[in-house]
Every structure is written in C-alpha cells, then in structure tokens.
Image (cartoon, rainbow, N blue to C red):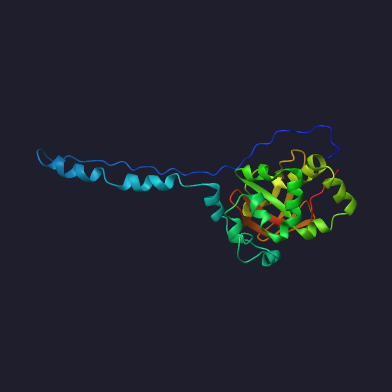
Amino acid sequence: MMTTTTRRTRFAALGAALLLPLAATACSSEETGPATAPSTESSPSMGSTPSTEASPSMGSSPRTDAAMGGEPFGAACAEVPTDGEGSVEGMADDPVATAASNNPLLSTLVTAVGEAGLGDTLNSQQAITVFAPTNEAFGAVDPETMDAAMGDPTGLLTDVLTAHVVPERLSPEMLAGEHETLNGEQLVMVEGSGEEFTVNGEAMVVCGNVQTANATVYLIDQVLLPTS
C-alpha cells in the first residue's frame, strides 16, 4: 500500500439508506343510479389514510437502519461496558469516531485517529463499516512499526487507518467478500459466515455488528498492516 507509485485520491461515501415508498391504492366508484347514489359513495373515497401512511415513508435514516442490523456477537463483546456512552446502546447514538472515544477497548485506535486528524472525516461519513483494532491488537504491533506510523500521521498512519474503513455499511450477511477501502489502494478480504469471520486471512472479528449512528463496527484482534 505504501510502496505503490499510483494513488487514488478520491473516495466516495457509499451506502445511503434505501427508502421504500408507499403506493396509494386507487379507489374506484360504481354508479348505480341517479340522484342520491353519488353522494353516498364519494365520502369514503377521500379518508385520512393517505396522511397516516405518508409520515413513515420518509422516516428512514442511517440511525434507523442501524437498529435493524441485529445484535452484536463475539467473545469480546462481554468486555464492552454494559451502560454509559461506551456501551453498545450508548455508542449507537453517536457518529463512529465519537462513539469509539467512549469505548475503553478502543482507546489506542482513538488516539491514532486523533493524531491523523481523521475524527471529523469518519464522523461525517453517511454509512461506513469500520474494522476497529482493539488495544490488544495495537499492543501486538512491532514497536518500531508503531513508532513509524505515529511519527507520520498524515502519511503512513492515515494510510493504515483508512485501510480499515469500507465506504459502505455491511451487515454480517454482507460481510464476506472483497471490499474497497477509503485508502483506495488497499482492499480488505473477509472470510467466514454467521458469527465467525477473519479479515485479510489473519485478523479475527472478536466483537461484531456494533452499531453507531453512521457506521457498523467490527472489533478485530489485529491491525491490518500493509501487505507490500
């Protein structure tokens, strides 16, 4: 990722929520005779149903879609706080960088995102998937590599972090496969199904399907480092 000579510099945020419009049913009237018949049939043809059906048709949002994503899974979910802003319920109310800042399992990732100046970028995305290395994952990185990344926040560190972000909101059913990242050069390959997934052949999803206001988060046990 860092050695390639060509870099794509534009990435589009994908995965806007799909809205299903409600179709109004047509009413047909049957004329049966003169004089009083039309007056008795016209009153029920324009009732209050259109107004009651119109309001939910425009109610979808990234937050609403998140609530439909199912429950988190994985052994490390037991380590997530059970209440407060860092809990699963608390994280669902905030955009992803803010939500992660409240979760004690992700404090090293939050520090790295802050150093790279990516907090606002992640929070402003409409629908993304984040493979979030835990503190233990960062602790397993070679110190020399970690120091090099932190010492180059707008270069190497940004490259590494954006390679953990897919510009599309992926449910567990959509997770397996190859996905483009915000890095633009690095892809992620996810294998598995159900509640067991690996990322790039090594990193394990240890707590998956955690929802924030604009992202689906999969906590992983390794940092996704460049392959070349």
- The residue lying toward the viewer, choosing from 177 and 219, is 219
Locate residue 185, reporting x and y percent.
Answer: 77, 38
Residue 191 image-quadrant placement: bottom right
Residue appearing at x 62%, y 42% in the figure: 124
Task: Say whether residue 139 is visible.
Answer: yes
76 relative to 37 in the view: left or right = right
- The residue lying toward the viewer, choosing from 223 and 69, is 223
Which quadrant holds the C terminus?
A: top right
Residue 121 image-quadrant placement: top right
Where 65 sits versus 11, above or below?
A: below
Locate residue 188, reporting x and y percent.
Answer: 74, 47
Task: Spot the residue most to the left.
Answer: 35
- The residue lying toward the viewer, choosing from 186 and 177, is 186
Residue appearing at x 68%, y 54% in the figure: 101
Where 51 sits versus 198, above or below?
A: above
194 relative to 146 in the view: left or right = left
Task: Say whether residue 68 is visible.
Answer: no
Task: Spot the residue most to the right.
Answer: 144
Residue 86 image-quadrant placement: bottom right
Where 54 sits versus 199, above or below?
A: above
